[in-house]
Amino acid sequence: MEKIFIGNLKISAVIGTLEHERHTPQELCFDLELCCDGTAAAISDDLHDAVDYSAVEAAVVKTVSGSSFFLLEALTRSVGETILSFPQVLSCTVRVAKPAASRYGALISYQAAFDRSRG
């Protein structure tokens, strides 16, 4: 099983439960790990046999920027479902950090793993 990493993907979105968070988009930072079988792509050297990571990135940006979840858990699940909509992706791990969440400078993040059997 091969892995594709998309790291430090910054996207602004409405996220949070506090009143000011419901009106002002915040920058979020995503780290994505996609598991796939890259054998066919390695042999053919053809994008049609591979995970098009630029298409995955664009789909995640569209999903996140158009969202307005209250919780990181719900947003993360939506991103996981978006990634699994690509047929070559067998499973994925999504980590989202919310830099503005801590008053004390801590980096708050949430991570979840998704696969086709669990969703």
Image (tube, rainbow, N blue to C red):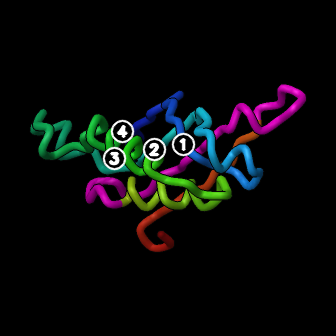
Question: Mark 1 and mark 4 in contact (Cβ < 8 Å)?
Answer: no
Q: Give, as a three-letter code, the residue at label 4.
A: Glu
Q: Secondary structure at mark 2?
A: helix
Disc 2 to disc 3, C-alpha distance: 10 Å
Disc 1 from disc 2: Cα separation:
5 Å
- Residue type at tag 2: Ser
Q: Which mark is residue 65?
A: 2
Question: What residue is rendered at 63% in x and 45% in y?
Answer: 23
> Does residue 91 belong to the magenta stretch?
yes
| Label 3–label 4 contact, CB within 8 A | yes
Disc ID at residue 44? none
Q: Which residues are magenta?
A: 85-107
Distance from disc 2 to disc 4, alpha carbons, whole Å, reads 12 Å
Q: Secondary structure at mark 1?
A: strand
Asked if labels 3 and 1 touch by Cβ distance under 8 angstroms, the answer is: no
* 64 with respect to 56 (left or right): right
Residue where numbered disc 3 is placed: 59
